[in-house]
Amino acid sequence: MPVADRSGDGAVRLARRTWAAAPAVVLLTAAAVAAATTGAGGGTTPLGVVDAGPLTRWALPFSRTVADVAAVATVGALVLAAVLLPGPRRLAPAQGRAMLWASAAAGVWAVASVAVVVFTLSDLSARPAADVLEPAVLLDFVATDSRGTAHALTATTAALLATFGPGVTTAGWARFWLLAALAGLLPPAFTGHAAGSAGHDAAVVSLAVHLVGVTLWVGGLAFLLPVVARRHPDAAVAVRRFSVLAGAALVAVGAGGVVGAVIRLPGWDALFTSAYGRLVLVKTAVLVLLGLAGAWHRRRSLAAIATRAGAGAFVRLAAGELLLMAVAMGLAVGLARTPPPSSAAAALSPAGELLGFPMPPPLGGFPWTPLFTQWHFDPVFAFGTAAAGLAYAVGVRRLRARGDHWPVGRTVSWFLGLAVTVLATMSGLAVYGKVMFSVHMGQHMVLAMTVPILLVLGAPATLALRALPAAGRDAPPGPRELLLKLLHSTYVRVISHPAVAGVLFIGSAFAVYYTSLFEALMRSHLGHLVMLVHFLAVGLLFFWVIIGVDPGPRRPPHLGRLFVLMLTMPFHSWFSISLMSSTGLLAEGWWTSLARPWGPSLADDQYNAGAIAWATGDIPVLITTIILAVQWVRSDSREARRVDRRIDRGDAGDPLAAYNAYLAALHARDRRAVATRRAPAPPNEGPS
């Protein structure tokens, strides 16, 4: 044991000495791999124009690598402060130091992103970098080119974090800046090869998921190392939390990479015959090695992390993982600069360029069979519904394994809701929903008024509260405690108020469709996705308030819920009628740019959209009213049985039981008084 302790202390001391040099090692490794895979010494010129010069050829991949490493460091420090280290509402000293690291890294990220803007403009215009440093030229590039806009947004986010990060003192603000930093990663994902390929909506979403997963994984591990090396009191808790985070990140990275490769490569042979395919293979091998290292961590290091030898083993293996991650980051930069095989990008019409897929065939026949034969893969809803179904199945299995009952009807309702979600987001409803307003409105109604009814009846929060283990008395809060805290938070209390939920449910339709926001969202892949998710979210909120089974901060009485439902639906009818009677075309620019050669005119299609909204709104309302009535009757029956049980037990604490006992006592007293008045007088025994 002493030998093991000394070796563990030696590994920890080595980790302490080398951690300060880790950023430089990671940066140089990633930059070297990026330069090697992009051919920085003699790269290709865009579209055969004159080369921008050796400075741009070398500086562009290097500045991108610096920006990537700084972004990883920023997110990693924020993950440590907001997620991995447990603490009170105000940040502990270790969390405060992590916020300072995040702010410093964000400053580097902002500067590197500005450099990326400059060298990207130099590369695209084939002009030396010194010739594009004029403010007017740079502003025009940022305002008119999607690549310039994307990197400028990233630089702005990083600069804001670098400015305000040092003043953060609470965990809530740390989590806010973590979400902001992750959002800052996304704009560049919507430019480049992913945004310009067929199936670009799936490509850019898969790339965004891939980027978020890699950044959380690499950054979290990099800042977990010093916590373990310095034997922080909460090191074991931080490692356990990171293990869960790393597992989710590995799934996200693998899924995003697979989807991206399938979209960009024309076939399996392109993996071996093209430079892009070979880079994909090498990066896949690196990710597999990282996954194996994570499995080793989980099996060996986690159990012994509290010991010196266990900490030393964790540090040694994690240092090797960081080097592999640096190689993966360099390969990612190389992939971004390497064009996929030309045959993978099928020629698309102007409408296909906007849609991301060819114009679908005419929607005819009975019963509109293309709605069920035209499918388009969406990674967000595909992986999201798969994860939701798997988590629910695991929860039900855990309950039944310990002998607890879970209603079959709730399970059926949940999985039926997920199936309808897939149908609405990946079948012909999704394909034709981007081409015809009427089909889009049908997709909206399904996501906002049909899927939520099924999902809220599945009671996922109740299942999670019953299936998740409770944290120990002295242990930091776990997932179950965090879920309870969320359900009873001020934020949920506000948005779950019936008036707020009703306004969000109906008001969002007017805010989206009767403003320029609708056309802007339809033109953006991310915007269209956000719109669909928003409709689903407000539907879930509204129907949770009306017929939800899961607990919440407030539970209005059934009569109040019925009143909210009846008060909200006329506004839905008003929206539908106004859409049918409108003389102006909504999102006219989008529908006109598609130049759909078949089907009804734009005016008739908009009228059909209003009719669909009106017709499909009545059926869910009727179903919801019936469900609410059944819940009301069952609630009264349960309350009556509960009162009867308390009366049978003689429980005077129940107000109704106490009142009944009071009435019984009064009745008994009255009977005694009547009996006393009617009793005969005693006989007179005196002398006559």
Image (spheres, rainbow, N blue to C red):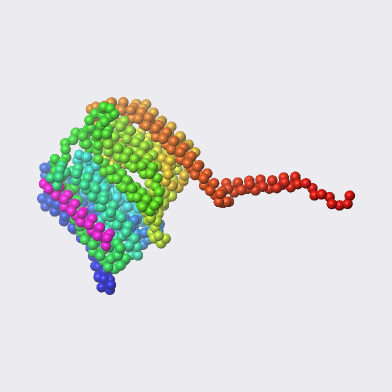
Q: Is residue 39 above or below residue 94?
A: above
Seen at 42% across and 60% down, the residue is 473
In the drawing, does residue 647 fall left or right of residue 322? Answer: right
Quarter-wise, where is residue 498 in the image? top left
User: Outermost residue, right direction?
Assistant: 688
In the drawing, does residue 243 fall left or right of residue 267? Answer: right
Q: Percent from the top left, x then y, of residue 54? A: 13, 51
In the drawing, does residue 476 fall left or right of residue 31? Answer: right
Q: Is residue 483 visible?
A: no
Q: Percent from the top left, x then y, of residue 652? A: 58, 51
Give the dominant element type of the magenta stretch: helix, strand or loop: helix
Seen at 23% across and 64% down, the residue is 316
Q: Percent from the top left, x then y, of residue 330? A: 18, 53
Quarter-wise, where is residue 355 in the image? top left
Q: Is residue 220 above or below residue 433?
A: below
Q: Percent from the top left, x then y, of residue 268? A: 15, 45
For the N terminus, which image quadrant? bottom left
User: Outermost residue, bottom direction?
Assistant: 2
User: What segment carries the magenta color?
Assistant: 272-300
Camera-nearest residue between 274 and 335: 274
Q: Is residue 614 visible?
A: yes
- Count of picture labels: 0
Camera-nearest residue between 188 and 464: 464
Q: Is residue 474 magenta?
A: no
Seen at 46% across and 37% down, the residue is 629
Seen at 21% across and 49% down, the residue is 116
Camera-nearest residue between 569 and 366: 366
